[in-house]
Image (spheres, rainbow, N blue to C red):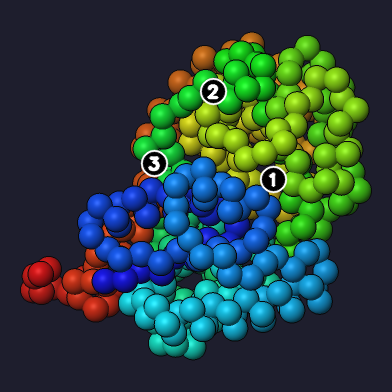
Amino acid sequence: MKVWIDISNAPHAHFFKGIIRELEKRGYDLLVTTRDFDGLTGILDLLGIEYYVVGKHGGSTLEGKLIASVERQVKLTNLIIEEKPDLALYKHSVEAPRVAFGLGIPSIGFVDNETAVAQNKLMLPLTRRILYPEPIDKYDLMRCGADVNSLRPVRGFAELAHTYGFVPSKEPLKELGIREHDYIVMRPEPIKANYFNGDAEKSVLERVIPMLPDMPIVLFPRTESQRERFKHFDNVIMPEKPMDSLSLLYYASLMIGAGGTMNREAIALGTPTISTYPGKTLAVTRWMSELGLKFHSTDPLAVAKRAYEMLRANGKYRSYIRYTVSKLENPLEAILHEIETYEAYGTFEEVEGVVSP
């Protein structure tokens, strides 16, 4: 069976890398597509994943997004007609569901951001099987067009899949001149995302950094404007190229992020984490806060106070996070199960009395 995987955003490369490796081991034929966006091809190269670059990101305007998406759909359609995959797989992709549906290709999608309404309305109605973290209210997905019979909850979060086969390396630390458990990782707001409704001209992290002057901070800007905004801080280091960010998160004392993915990656790795996202709090974030896996605040003073608390009791936080995370379901296993179920039965529902070939 041939599986088409569309990787449309940088974090998705880490989400799908383990699925790709496992499908390769099990003898599946794979087709991976991506687009020119946010250093994505560099990350795929770093991971050793072969891919086709199809289209690009349309920027921050609605007009640019629409034109780039339509152009990408046309290019993907031509490629998929030629390649003839049996199944499509994606995470928050806009173009892949339309192409798969239009060509009659069954699809599996993973969604973990219920606030990305526009994106979800373009993806969910056209997706045959939808996996999502259990804390998300299924009615939020149904309001975006998801068929209730397509929904399959996962008691876990997407970034658990990112840790597949992970072996920490100290090479990135050497490259940046920092020591393990003696630095903080930061990530500013996702200002280009269509669901972001905060102020793109400032970041809460700009007010947090002056209160944490004694430790190096490795900051991953999303845009050149963000890089300019943070370059005057003496203790801030900003990598110039794609790096092994998982190792940097693993060895960090603390993660403070105004986005989502790197925060949850840090938690998956057992690193204490503070969320400073200024928009509507995701269901997964609220759930993690209730479990005591992360702290969320947009008040710089409250963030700094909690940061010092987490730094002082680092081992206690790490032990609790790793124990709690070990009890959760990895979406990687859930997706592999859905693929194998479809291959065996021609449906995403297991059929009683039918034996897998």
**Residue holding disc 3:** 164
Q: Amino acid at mark 3?
A: Tyr
Residue 322: give x, y in percent of width and height.
44, 28
- Kindly state the secondary structure of the residue where label 3 is placed: loop
**Residue holding disc 2:** 171
What numbered label is drawn on residue 259? 1
* Foreground of the two, 149 or 104: 104
Q: Residues within 10 Å of mark 2 (few under 14, many from 20)?
A: few
How far separated are the C-alphas under marks 3 and 2?
A: 19 Å
Q: Which residue is at a point 44% across and 47% down the rendered structure image?
A: 48
- Kindly state the secondary structure of the residue where label 2 is placed: helix
* Residue 204 shown left or right of residue 13 in the figure: right
Residue 125 visible at all = no
Comparing marks 3 and 2, which lies closer to the viewer? Answer: 2
How far separated are the C-alphas under marks 1 and 3?
A: 22 Å
How far separated are the C-alphas under marks 1 and 2?
A: 25 Å
Tell me whether the residue at label 3 lies in contact with that at label 2, contact meaning CB atoms closer than 8 angstroms.
no
Residue 179, quarter of picture: top right
Residue 148: give x, y in percent of width and height.
44, 76
Nearer-N-terminus badge (3/2): 3
* Foreground of the two, 330 or 239: 239
